[in-house]
Image (tube, helix red, strand yellow):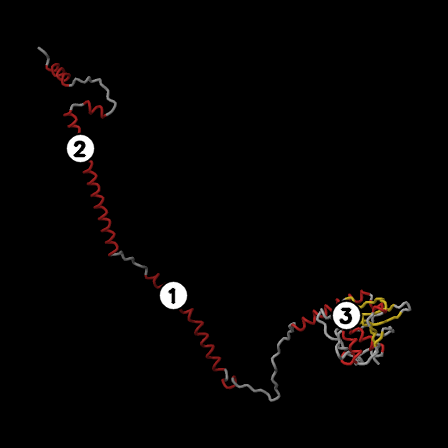
Amino acid sequence: MLDDSASTSLDARIADPTPPSTQFRSRRELRQAMPKSDRDVERAKRRELAEAKQSRMTASASAAQRLRRSERAALRRSLESPKRVRRNPISALITMAVVGGMFGLAALPAYADFDDHQQAGKAADPLGAQTLVVPATATSLAPHRDEYHATSPEVLAQVNINDILAANQAAYLASGARELGDDYPWAWQLSDDQGGGFSPLNYVYRQCVDFVAWRINRDQGYYEAPFKWVWSNLTPYGGNGGQWLYNWQALGRTVSDVPIPGAVAYTGGNHVAYVKTVFSDGTVLLEEYNYVPDAYSQRIVPASSVVAFLYPPS
């Protein structure tokens, strides 16, 4: 006859053929090795555990929500009925005294200024303050303004002319014309190209006709205005060099091919010169202006090369 405990152990080994010493690498292998009924039991346990955990979380959230509601209610009650703070009556009195003193100090200057003006108004005589006595001997003074000078266009033009005249004079003195015997009095006046005008002889400055007219006056003793011979009586039919021969003929003056000192040499074209010297070899020494442009010069030419010699008028 077998022992009951031995029989129970044998039945257990038969019911669970898996050796007790078997090791599982994971819970999943363990669950797979378990019988289906055991797995169902384990699933039910896990569901119970999950439901219990969810119940605890729900209860905790409800408690927290109830706590937040209570906190909001307490905050609302504190706002609706704030706690009154009891102040010290002494500090309130001090504050009132300080503020009152500040207002009093701010008002003092205004009252003082008003009183000063009142006292000044009482002391001043309104009629005497508005009375002004002007003596009969008083004279009115004209306003004085500082004088100023502005350079006008005319002054600027004259400055420019003065600069040109200075340059002309320097060039003339450097040319040696004075040493050669030039005595033309307007040797550095503005030329025609420089905007020059007419000389006292009524010919254009530094032209051949003006120089010859000057020499005719000089030879007859007229060195300054009023000159004896000017454009109106020397060449009344035209003052250009090419018109002098016609003027001599029209006025009945002597025209010759024989040169004499002091005669006018009409060399042709629009040019005249002054005969300074007649040489025995049949040549003549001429003095002239504007043979070299706007300048004095001398040259010796054959008398036969001169178109005509115009003897000086008397």
Q: Nearer the viewer, mark 3 or mark 1?
A: 3
User: Looking at the image, which residue sits at the far left?
Assistant: 1
Disc number for residue 6: none
Q: Is residue 272 above or below residue 43?
A: below
* Kind of residue at badge 2: Arg
Occupied quadrant, residue 220:
bottom right
The one nearer the camera, 282 or 64, is: 282
- Mark 1 sits on what residue? 99
Which numbered disc flags the more N-terminal residue, 2 or 3?
2
Q: Is residue 31 above or below residue 11?
A: below
Please state if 153 lies on the left or on the right of 273 as rendered. Answer: left
Label 1, label 2: how many angstroms apart (C-alpha)? 77 Å
- Mark 3 sits on what residue? 269
- Mark 2 sits on what residue? 47
Task: Give the SS element for disc 3.
Answer: loop
Occupied quadrant, residue 165:
bottom right
Residue 188's x, y, as percent?
A: 77, 70
Which numbered disc flags the more N-terminal residue, 3 or 1?
1
> At 34% across and 62% down in the image, what residue appears?
92
